[in-house]
Image (cartoon, rainbow, N blue to C red):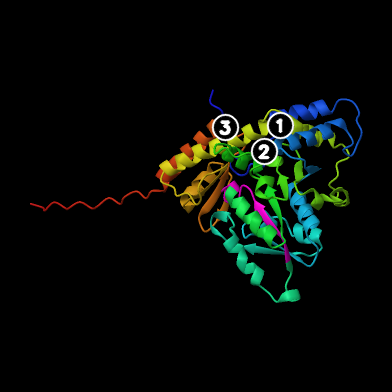
Amino acid sequence: MTARPDHFAFASDNTAGVCPEALAALAAANAGCLPSYGDDAPTAAAKKLFADLFETDCDVFFVFNGTAANALVLGAFCQRHHGILCHAMSHVDNDECGAPEFFTGGAKVLPVDAPLAKLRPADLEPLLRRGHGVHFPKIRALSLTQSTELGTVYTPGELRALCDWAHAHGLAVHVDGARFANAAAASRAAGHSPADLTWRAGVDALCFGGTKNGLLTTEAVVFFNRELAREFDYRVKQSGQLASKMRFASAQWSAVLRDGAWLRHGAHANRQAQALAGGLRDLGFKLVAPVEVNGVFVELPPAVVAALEARGWHFYKFVGEHGYRLMCSWATRDADVAAFLADARAAVGSSVPKPTPRPGKKKARG
């Protein structure tokens, strides 16, 4: 029996459910009573797994969502008179309802445009010459996204160049890693470890995404520069992000970190995106960005979009006039990819205008 397609499969990696490892961990954590607010053995064990994964001592905090993670880290970096550099497409600037400004007490987010959603030192340098002394915010932080909002991945070398530049100018480096698992899975083929993508390149703090990789309501904030984590636990509590039953968050992380499930799920989503992108290319559609992780950014004509939506598919316009985003997740099935491509093929056929019959010559009457 053929599996019915999930028409929300490509709307976002947030639409997927909880992965089996996390679901089993939640059930196991529900047995018995344990100390609250993180003073439990499962939370200590999870934090040890993060140190093992990144091959270094680090401070780890669990919060409920990515917006809080990013905003709280930038709040730890910045005061109200500071500025935060980020890409113009970043969530920090576009998708967090001013949370970074709120949690910093008014620091100014300074978006910078650059190709394929990736920043370079040369893109940032002009910002240092902007303004006149105390009349312009003092730039204090650089916020990067890994993988980026266009599904591209910073290499360790690119990260090192950015971090060296930032530190030379007194800036702390934050990474929004909502899709860090996908970036790590893509980088593994080149021999790069999670440590290579973070502290070895100079990253000060990583917001390690759990939600988009199959966890329920938990993100991990990992400080590699532990001095910057001073009193961060108070920030977490004051913002309403301290879980009283923290074992339910930490148990999920332990479940996916212990045997590498977090990386397998990221790799699966990436592979499904490659399959989807390949099928769309074969149909003649143009990709807006290279497919390096689990996002496919593609130009779709209005008639094709209308036909796909009429067939029940949900996805979002993301860039330019006709650029759409299709996201794969840990739960995306081969059947979902095949069904979408079949409907896209049918949409292409139905959107091609039928040729108008040419009138034949009338026979002369005898």
Q: Give the labeled residue for mark 3.
A: 333
Q: Distance between the residues labelled 3 and 2?
A: 15 Å
**Residue 100's x, y, as percent?**
75, 58
Of the residues under marks 2 and 1, which one precedes in the sequence?
Answer: 2
The residue nearer to you, when weighing 53 against 20, is 53
**Residue 162's x, y, as percent?**
63, 56
Above or below, 211 against 254 in this view is below
Tell me which residue sits at (71%, 53%) in the image.
174
The quadrant in which residue 200 appears is top right
**For the residues carrying marks 2 and 1, which lies nearer the camera in this image?**
1
**For the residues carrying marks 3 and 1, which lies nearer the camera in this image?**
1
**Residue 364's x, y, as percent?**
11, 53
Left or right: 30, with 287 as reference point: right
Q: How far apart are marks 3 and 1 (CA)?
A: 20 Å
* Mark 2 and mark 1 residues within 8 Å of each other at the beta carbon: yes
The reply to whether the magenta stretch includes residue 30 is no
Q: Is mark 2 on a helix, strand or loop?
A: helix
Inspect this view and state whether residue 207 appears: yes
Q: Which amino acid does label 2 sit on?
A: Asn
Residues shaded magenta:
139-156
Q: What crowding class fits label 3: few (fewer than 14 Cα within 10 Å), some (14-19), or many (20 or more)?
A: some
Left or right: 235, with 162 as reference point: right
Q: Give the labeled residue for mark 2.
A: 213
Q: What residue type is labelled 1?
A: Val
The reply to whether the magenta stretch includes residue 148 is yes
Left or right: 140, with 336 as reference point: right
* Mark 3 and mark 2 residues within 8 Å of each other at the beta carbon: no
Q: How far apart are marks 2 and 1 (CA)?
A: 10 Å
Q: Give the labeled residue for mark 1.
A: 256
Q: What crowding class fits label 2: few (fewer than 14 Cα within 10 Å), some (14-19), or many (20 or more)?
A: many
